[in-house]
Image: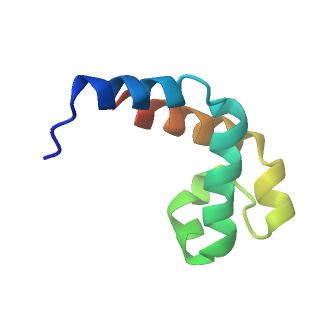
């Protein structure tokens, strides 16, 4: 387990406070599905994720990816 100093925590918090998760989250996770297409089998409930355009245009996937990134930073 990593033990962060208070200064390190402040730096990390400062950096992540400027991130727009609604913009970055869906883009980053969509790239994972595009680059690693076999991961799509885990997300069949999201509908059509068969090509890059479908992934980037899938509103359900975009909302979920945004929520995931927000939750990861809270952890």
Quadrant for the C terminus, please.
top left
Q: Nearer the viewer, residue 10 or 75?
A: 10
Identify the residue at horizontal 49%, vertical 23% (top origin): 14
Q: Name the colour scheme.
A: rainbow
In the visual, does 26 lie left or right of 45?
right
Residue 3: x percent and y percent?
15, 38
Identify the residue at horizontal 59%, vertical 67% (top origin): 40
How many discs appear?
Answer: 0
Is 37 located above or below residue 18 in the figure?
Answer: below
In the visual, does 23 lie left or right of 6?
right
- The image quadrant that residue 8 belongs to is top left
Residue 70: x percent and y percent?
51, 30
Residue 5: x percent and y percent?
21, 30
Is 28 located above or below residue 65 in the figure?
Answer: below
In the visual, does 7 lie left or right of 50?
left
Residue 73: x percent and y percent?
43, 33
Is 1 located above or below residue 33 in the figure?
Answer: above
Identify the residue at horizontal 66%, vertical 35% (top origin): 63
């Amino acid at each position: 387990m990593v033990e962060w100093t208070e200064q390190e925590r402040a730096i990390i918090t400062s950096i992540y406070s400027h991130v727009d998760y609604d913009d970055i989250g869906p883009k980053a996770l969509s790239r994972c599905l595009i680059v690693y297409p076999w991961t799509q089998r885990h997300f069949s409930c999201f509908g059509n994720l068969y090509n890059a355009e479908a992934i980037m245009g899938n509103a359900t996937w975009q909302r979920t990816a945004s929520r995931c990134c927000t939750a990861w930073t809270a952890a």
